Image (spheres, rainbow, N blue to C red):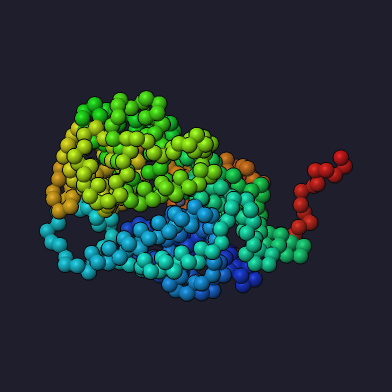
Amino acid sequence: MKLSFHGAASCVTGSCHLLDVDGFRILVDCGMFQGPDEIFSSNLKPFGFEPDSISAVLLTHAHLDHCGRLPFLVRQGFRGPVVSTAPTRYLAEIVLWDSAHLQEERTAENSGPKKNGRKGRSSGSGGRKKHGSFYSVADVLDAMSLFTRTAEYEVPVNLAPGIDATFYNAGHILGSASIQITVSRPGKRTRILFSGDLGPKTHPLLAPASPPDDSDYVVMETTYGDRLHRSFESSKDELLGVLVDTYRRGGQVLVPTFALERAQDLLFFFREWRDGGKLPGKEPFFLDSPMAISVTHIYERFPELLDDRLKKFFQQGKDPFMFPELQLTRSVLESRSIKESSARSVVLAGSGMVSGGRILYHLGREIENPRSSLVFVGYQAEGTLGRAILEGEKTVRLLGAEKSVKIGLHSINGFSAHADQRDLLAWCKQMGAPEGVFLIHGEKRSLEGFRDKLSEIGWNKIRIPSLHEEVVLSERPTGKARPDPLEGA
Ligand SMILES: [Zn+2]
């Protein structure tokens, strides 16, 4: 049995791992390399294996860095089944469509006439100019037709004789899973657990991760393996404070929002504050992102997978994400009409890093208004307009016009959908020490920091694989199972 690492090896993007069991080849995740040009260009490089040799793809969740290269894999010859939870299938469809659409747009942009005389940081570049499309909307359609197997949490899915995959809640985004692959042979049983991305212990919408009791090998993410998040509650309080202060000044609150997960977190907070009388009046909220609206409707379809507090809303016939003051502005016309009611309101719009999307129009209108607020609630990558503004750029170019940054700036960092070091360790402690651990999906500092922490809890056989590295896993004999608890009773 061989395990190889074709993405998220010593970095945090492009998750893609291959388990070869006597020629039955299982790919766990097929993620896009996200980032500036030098990282993004990795998407066009060979996978490190023959796409048509893959027997099945298992997806841990629908974030682009875990599923974003799937249409490219299909374009290159993969024809096997894709196995995922039901929400991951629906969310991946939205995410992949959006990705194909953005790639096509970028190709059109790159092949258009060059604009000269740009001054300062410009909107829409996202730090990327050279690389265009590596798959199309048609490839996404082909990929979606392969989602033929649906996994329920904790119910094994048979992949081939003696090979099963069981999905466990990872508490990261809706439908996210850790996947344990069990290979059974006469006298042997080997269990390999892929953590996927793990959520924080106190997730606003989801129950915390629940891994299986034991695994022989664990392939584990360490995105925040070297640090602790700021308290979630204090971040919520800070955001509420920004809303109240901005309303008092008669301004508007703009929140560049990631469509998947963060937008739904925020809608639920707003609903709680509104119901609890924490907001001054009946100020309007706008969810101005067609993608976030679609994603929210998928969250509404799976109340059984949400946290108990949200389940209670559905049981009472209420929707935890919707309230009378919230307007869903799907069309461009509706989006443009927001300016009529601009004061004392909140606008959630993409993109989350201000590298494109409708947030640009709202920002163009409000950026020179000191009464309004711009609130960053997620990571702003290098090369994006969001990062430039956050780092104090005084003038920016927005939709062709030079603008001074006078809007109030806030960055609230405690809303991560990722486990921090404490949460990751707590996840490990729910299991017995495995025979081998592979740390992935982290920067060097994080991987090494977390390796040291794991040794403290007795997890010792730890390896940090490099890109395309292959390791042979020895199969485990079944004889050494733990003693039967009923024996001698
Ligand atoms: Zn993720």
Q: Is residue 353 visible?
A: no
Q: Is residue 400 visible?
A: yes
Depth order, front residue of 167/449: 167
Name which residue lies at 50% across and 60% down: 29
Name which residue lies at 17% across and 43% down: 365
Quarter residue 44 falls in? bottom left
Q: Position of residue 335 (x, y in %)?
A: 24, 47
Compared across the picture, whether 312 is left or right of 412 comes to: right
Name which residue lies at 16% across and 39% down: 368
Residue at far right of view: 488
Residue at far left of view: 117
Quarter of the rendering occupied by the N terminus: bottom right
Q: Position of residue 159 (x, y in %)?
A: 62, 64
Quarter of the rendering occupied by the C terminus: top right
Depth order, front residue of 383/261: 261
Q: Is residue 122 above or below residue 429?
A: below
Tell me how many marks there are: 0
Q: Position of residue 343 (x, y in %)?
A: 21, 34
Q: Position of residue 486 (x, y in %)?
A: 83, 43
Name which residue lies at 21% across and 37% down: 341
Residue at far front of view: 317
Depth order, front residue of 288/431: 288
